[in-house]
Amino acid sequence: MVLRLLFVLLIALNIAVGAWLWLGQDDTHGRSAADPEVPTLRLLAERPAPPASAPEAAATVQAPVAAATPASSAAKAPAQTTLAPTPSRSNTYTCISIGPFAAPVDLHNARNALTAQAARMRSRQEQTTQTRGWWVYLPASASRDQALAQARRLSAANIADYFVVGSGGQPNTISLGLFKDPANARKRRDEVVAAGFPAQMTERTETVPEYWLDLAVTDGAHFDWHSRLRNATGIGSHSTGCF
């Protein structure tokens, strides 16, 4: 009984497989697995050969494209404009120096007052030698005692206002006075010499800074610095090299 049942099942299975093979395969009936709207893919080898005039048409089509390529490149390139040089007008200048100013603050005030009238300006400092006065004295003695003895002789001759220098660069010298006016210094020297003493006279100097303001002024600008500077006592001007 079991063998018959197995035989029937095998026959039924074979019939089902045969039906599936016959009815379930699309290629058997020449149907496509793709949707009807989707175009069929073809290999390049399956494409038909183009007609003989096709290369000429392709060359005709490609020619305008090749000719248009430089034009598009030229359109992308930035435009370059050559400007004609602008003629320049060179001004001529007159350069002067104003000073000397005694202090930096005076120079600063002058610079502010003249900025609007000058095309260029510069400040500078120089060292100069100024006279501190005229000194009348008796030359140094060989020793301190000799200098004091000479001072006593001055007193005996009714010559006052002297000082015995005890230290510094000229010890044992007898100072007879420091004068701003050289005429007064000469008068003092002559009085002491007339009393029989070897009085001498020398100029005392010192190095001090002084300040100058150089300006470049455009010719024809009617530059007048006197009207701009107040309290310009002792201030002058002279021509200088332009800078």
Image: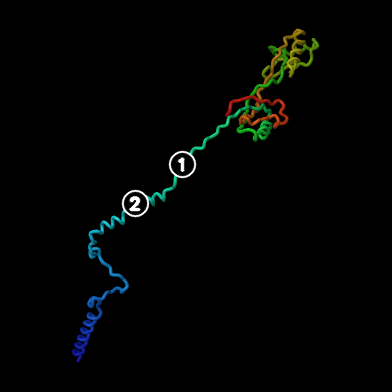
Q: Which colour scheme is used?
A: rainbow
Query: Which quarter of the figure is the C terminus placed in?
Result: top right
Q: Which residue appears at 32% of the width and 73% of the height? A: 37
Q: Mark 2 points at which residue?
A: 67
Callout 2 touching callout 1 (CB < 8 Å)? no
The residue that appears at 28% across and 68% down in the rendered structure is 41
Query: Element at badge 1?
Result: loop
Measured as percent of width and height from the top left, residue 126 is found at: 62, 26
In this orientation, which residue lies closer to the viewer: 163 or 125?
125
> Badge 1: few (under 14), some or many (20 or more) residues near its Cα, within 10 Å?
few
Query: Which numbered disc flags the more N-terminal residue, 2 or 1?
Result: 2
Question: Which amino acid type is marked by label 2?
Answer: Ala
* Up/down of 3 relative to 204, above or below: below
User: For the residues marked 2 and 1, what is the alpha-carbon distance in whole angstroms?
Assistant: 28 Å
Q: In this view, does 67 lie to the left or right of 104?
A: left
Instruction: Depth check: give the residue in front, 225 or 106.
Output: 225
Residue 104 versus residue 147 in the image, above or below: below
Q: In this view, does 83 lie to the left or right of 3?
A: right
Q: Say how many tags the image has.
A: 2
Name the residue nearer the viewer: 112 or 62: 62
Q: Is mark 2 on a helix, strand or loop?
A: helix
Crowding around mark 2 (Cα neighbors within 10 Å: few <14, some 14 to 19, many 20+) is few
The image position of residue 135, as x and y in percent, is 72, 16
Q: Is residue 35 above or below residue 188?
A: below
Locate the N terminus and report the quarter of the image it occupies. bottom left
Q: Which mark is residue 82?
A: 1
* Residue 142 in the image, given as x and y percentages of width and height: 68, 12
Identified at 65% across, 33% down, the residue is 117
Residue 116 horizontal/vertical position (percent): 65, 35
Q: Residue furthest bottom?
A: 1
14, 74: nearer the viewer: 74
Q: Which amino acid does label 1 sit on?
A: Thr
